[in-house]
Amino acid sequence: MSSRFDQGIPDGVLERARAGDRAAQGELFAIFGPAVFGLARRMLGRSDQADDVLQETFMEVLKSLPQFRGEAPLGMWIRRIAVNECLMHMRSHWHRFRLPLDTGAEGSSVEDWLASEDPPPDKGVDMERALEALSPEARAVVWLHDVEGYTHVEIGRLMKATPSFSKSQLARAYVRMRQWAGEAKEVQACMPALNN
Amino acid sequence: MHASLEQLIGLRDEEPVAVEVQQHVRRCNQCAAALNGLLAARERVQSLPDLAPPSDAWQRIVAASERSSRRRRWLPAAAGLAVAASVVGIVVYLGPHAMHPADNTTLAAVPPSGGQPADINQLMAQSRYLERAVYELGGQSDSSAMSAGTASTIAALEDRIALIDYEIGTATQAPHAPAGAHVKELWQQRVDLLQSLAAVRYAQTANTGI
C-alpha cells in the first residue's frame, strides 16, 4: 500500500524551494497540499479544521525546509508534520468540546460485524460519511493505519496509547462504520414509504 | 469460538496471527465472511478520493508565512514596543468602549514589558486587558462578513488560548506545582496569542468598515 504522501518531486524543485524560491515552494504545495488536506479532513472530520492544519503544516514546512536534510523522503517528512498538527488539534480543549468522544461502548466481535448488513460496494460517499460518524480517535486510527500504512505500534506512540488501543479502535471503527452504512441503507429504503 | 475482529484484522493485514486462528478462519464460514467484509471495507476507505484544498489556500499560506518571518526578524528586539503598539491601537480604535466602567484596569496599569521580562502579575493584567479588548472587538464585528480564512485563524488562536488555559490550570493545581518560570512562560504565551487574536479581530473589523 502506498501513502498519498509517496510522491515524486521534479528535479531541482526541492533545492530551489529550500533556497526560498516561491514558485518551487508552490510546486511542493501543489504536489503535497491535497495529501495534507485529505489527511487532516479525514482525521479531524471538518474542512475548516483541515484548512487550519494545511496552513500550519505548510508554514512549518516553509520555515524548516532549509534544515531538511533529506534523511527521509520529503513527503514522509511533510506527513509527520501534518499528523502532529492533526493530533495537536485533536488534543485541543475546545476541539474536544465540539466532537463526539469515543465512549468505547461499541462492540467489536465477529457477531457484531455479522449482525449488521453488508453496505453496497459502490458507496464511496457513504464511506466518507461513515468515517465522519466515528470518534476522532477511531477516525484517526482508521486513516493512519489503513490508508497511510502506520503500524499499531507507531499509532500507539503517536496517540500516547498502547498498540492494543489502536487495534481495538480499528476493530470497533469497522463495526461502527458497517452498522452506520446498514442504518443509512435502512433510512434510504424507508424514504419511498415516507413519501407515500 | 470465533476469531476476534482484532485477529481477523491481523490476518487481513498479514500480521502474525496464531496458527489455530488461521485454521479456524479457513473452516468457519462466518469468520471467512467477516474477513472478506473487512478486506472490502479497507478497500473502500483506501479508494476514497483525494480532496482538493481551498483554492486560495496557498496564497494565504504565503501571506501568513511572510508575516510570520517578518515577525521573527524584529519581534525579539521590539517585543515590548509591539505590546504597547497593539494595545494603544486597540484603545484608540475602541475609544470610550475600551474600558468597562467596572473594570479598574487601565493602560497605565498594564505596563508593556519594554524588552524586560514581565512579572507574572503584569502578564496577567495584560492578559485581562487584551481579553476585554478582544471581547469588545468581537462584539462589534460582523461575523457573516468574515472570510473562512479569518474565521479559521480566529478559531485556531482561540483553540490555542484554551489549550494554554488548560495547561495553566493543570500547572497551578498540580500537587507538585512546576516552577514559577514555567507558569510565567505559559502566561507570556497567552498574552502573545491574545495580541494576535486582537490584531486579527481589529483587522477584520476595520476591513468590514464597522
Image (tube, grey):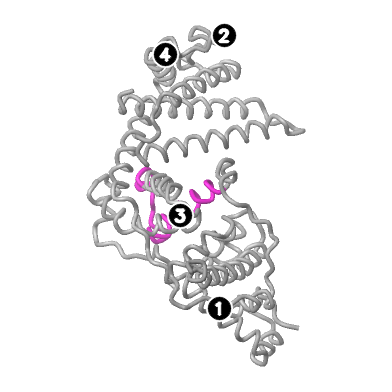
Decide whether residue A65 is among the magenta residues: yes
User: Quarter-wise, where is residue B172 in the image?
Assistant: top right
Judged from the image, the secondary structure of the residue bearing numbered disc 1 is: loop
| Rendered-image quadrant of the C terminus of chain B | top left
Q: Classify residue B179 by image quadrant.
A: top right
Q: Which residues are magenta?
A: A62-90
> Which amino acid, by three-letter code, is at mark 2?
Asn
Which of the labelled discs sits on residue A118, or is there none? 1
Crowd class of label 1 (few under 14; some 14 to 19; many from 20; radius 10 Å): some
Q: CA distance from mark 1 to mark 3?
A: 28 Å
Q: Secondary structure at mark 4?
A: helix
Q: Which residue is mark 4?
A: B91
Name the spot of residue A118 as percent of width and height, x first: 55, 78
Query: What distance separates the C-alpha of mark 2 from that of mark 3?
Result: 44 Å
The amino acid sitting under disc 4 is Val
| Tag 1: amino acid | Asp
Q: Position of residue B164 (x, y in %)?
A: 57, 34
Q: CA distance from mark 1 to mark 2?
A: 65 Å
